[in-house]
Amino acid sequence: MKHKNRPGFVEARPHAALTTGEVIKMLRQLKGWTQAEFAKRCGISATNISLLENGKVEIGKRRSEQIAEAFGVHPAIIMFPEYEGNGIKKNAA
């Protein structure tokens, strides 16, 4: 491991922002759930899960609460992934 105090060392910065759909898909896959299984767990149709994951529809408060409850996370992790990246990593497993 390189040391931060070493001359010329530049700490890496995150450069990829996740969309809400990408977060949903990532969490679902980390849980090992298919879209159909996840749909049953959160009460949203598999068609709508696909649309959400692919950014074709907006999430909305009600859906974010249903999805968050199925994953066991706070709805902010779903609605605002750019602010909740550390929470996603912590709660994904």
Image (cartoon, rainbow, N blue to C red):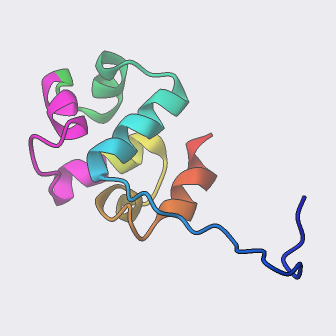
Of residues 19 and 10, the one drawn nearer to the viewer in this rendering: 10
x%, y% of residue 44?
20, 32
x%, y% of residue 34?
38, 18
x%, y% of residue 17?
38, 59
Q: In this view, does 46 lie above or below 79?
A: above
Q: Residue at x 53, y 32 (%)?
A: 30
Q: Residue at x 17, y 26 (%)?
A: 45
Magenta residues, start to end:
47-66
Left or right: residue 56 versus residue 29 is left
Quadrant including the C terminus: top right
Left or right: residue 60 versus residue 11 is left
Can residue 44 be seen from the camera position used here?
no
Quadrant including the N terminus: bottom right
Can residue 34 be seen from the camera position used here?
yes
Looking at this rendering, what residue extends furthest in the front direction?
8
Q: Which residue is drawn at 35% across and 29% down?
A: 41
Of residues 60 and 17, the one drawn nearer to the viewer in this rendering: 17
Left or right: residue 5 versus residue 30 is right
* Residue 92 shown in magenta: no
